[in-house]
C-alpha cells in the first residue's frame, strides 16, 4: 500500500498549499448547498403530520448534531495520530477544529431545546441523548481551555490529544443512547444503511443541509489550520516566502 499521501498530509507546507486549492471550492459549494437545504426545509418542505411546523428546526438541528460528532471523531483520530506518529498537522487539526465542533454542539443543544419545548413541553430534560451531547460540548470546551491555558505548546498538544482519544467513548453513547435507554429523543432521522422514513421532499433538503454543512465546516477548518500553520512554522523559509509572495 502506498502511504505517500499520508505522509504528505502530515507536512505543513504540503497541506497549506493543498488547502489553498480546495478551501474556496469547499466553502462555495458547501454554503450553496446549505442555503438551498435550509431555505427549502424551512419555507417549502411540507409540515409534519404530528409536529406541524415545529419540526422544521430539524434542518438546523440534525446537521449541527451530526457535525458535532464528526468533528470530535476527527479530533480523536488526530489525537491518536499525534500520540503514535507525532505528525505535525495532527495538533494543528485539533486546535483548528475544536472550536468549530463546540459551536456545532452548542447549536445542536440550543436548537434541540427549542424543538423540545413544543414537542415534550420542556426546554431541557436529563435525557440520555441530551446529556451525552452536553458532555460532548464540555469535552470540546476542555480541549479549548487546555490549549489556551498552557504556555508549553508541546505539553498542551499532548494533553488535548489524550483527551480527544479518551473522549471518543462518548460517541457510541450518543449514537446508541436512544436504543440502550428509555429516552424522549426520537431515533435517527435517516441513516446511510436504511431507506428514509420521510418523503423525499422532506429528507432531500435535510440531506442537502447536512452535506452543505460538511463542506462549510471543512472550508473554515482548512482556513483555521492554515493560520495555525503560519503561527507554528513562522521561522520556516517556505512560510517567509509564502508571506512575501502572497502578502499574508
Image (spheres, rainbow, N blue to C red):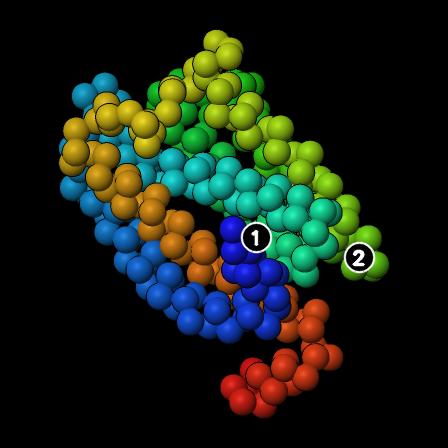
Q: Nearer the viewer, residue 73 or 131?
A: 73
Q: Secondary structure at mark 2?
A: helix
The image position of residue 115, as x and y in percent, is 38, 29
Q: Secondary structure at mark 1?
A: helix
> Local crowd at mark 1 within 10 Å, few (<14), some, or many (≥20)?
many
In the picture, measured across the screen, residue 103 lies left or right of residue 83, that is: left
Residue 80 point in image, percent of width and height: 67, 44
In front: 225, or 128?
A: 225
Label placed on residue 97: 1
Q: Is residue 187 above or below residue 77?
A: above
Camera-side residue of 142 and 89: 89
Q: Which image quadrant for residue 118?
A: top left
**Is residue 132 visible to the viewer in this orientation of the structure?**
yes
Furthest residue to the bottom? 244
The residue located at (32%, 32%) in the rendering is: 192
Q: Quadrant of residue 167?
A: top right
Identify the residue shown where x is 29% and y is 25%. Answer: 194
Whichever of callouts 1 and 2 sits on the residue coming sooner in the sequence is 1
Q: Residues within 10 Å of mark 2 (few under 14, many from 20)?
A: few
- Residue visible at 61% across and 66% down? 11
Residue behind mark 2:
154
Up/down of 140 relative to 229, above or below: above
Amino acid at each position: 500500500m502506498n502511504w505517500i499521501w499520508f505522509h504528505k498530509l502530515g507536512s505543513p507546507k504540503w497541506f497549506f498549499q493543498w488547502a489553498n486549492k480546495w478551501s474556496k471550492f469547499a466553502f462555495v459549494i458547501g454554503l450553496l448547498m446549505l442555503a438551498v437545504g435550509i431555505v427549502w426545509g424551512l419555507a417549502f418542505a411540507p409540515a409534519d403530520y404530528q409536529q406541524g411546523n415545529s419540526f422544521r428546526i430539524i434542518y438546523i438541528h440534525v446537521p449541527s448534531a451530526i457535525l458535532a460528532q464528526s468533528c470530535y471523531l476527527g479530533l480523536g483520530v488526530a489525537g491518536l495520530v499525534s500520540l503514535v506518529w507525532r505528525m505535525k498537522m495532527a495538533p494543528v487539526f485539533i486546535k483548528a477544529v475544536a472550536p468549530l465542533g463546540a459551536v456545532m454542539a452548542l447549536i445542536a443543544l440550543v436548537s434541540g431545546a427549542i424543538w423540545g419545548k413544543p414537542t415534550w413541553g420542556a426546554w431541557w430534560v436529563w435525557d440520555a441523548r441530551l446529556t451525552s451531547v452536553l458532555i460532548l460540548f464540555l469535552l470540546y470546551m476542555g480541549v479549548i481551555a487546555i490549549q489556551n491555558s498552557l504556555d508549553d505548546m508541546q505539553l498542551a498538544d499532548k494533553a488535548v490529544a489524550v483527551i480527544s482519544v479518551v473522549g471518543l467513548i462518548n460517541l457510541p453513547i450518543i449514537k446508541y443512547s436512544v436504543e440502550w435507554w428509555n429516552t424522549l429523543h426520537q431515533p435517527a432521522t435517516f441513516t446511510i444503511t436504511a431507506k428514509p422514513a420521510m418523503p423525499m421532499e422532506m429528507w432531500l433538503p435535510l440531506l442537502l443541509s447536512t452535506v452543505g454543512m460538511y463542506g462549510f465546516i471543512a472550508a473554515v477548518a482548512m482556513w483555521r489550520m492554515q493560520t495555525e500553520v503560519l503561527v507554528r512554522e513562522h521561522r520556516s523559509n517556505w512560510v517567509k516566502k509564502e508571506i512575501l509572495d502572497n502578502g499574508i
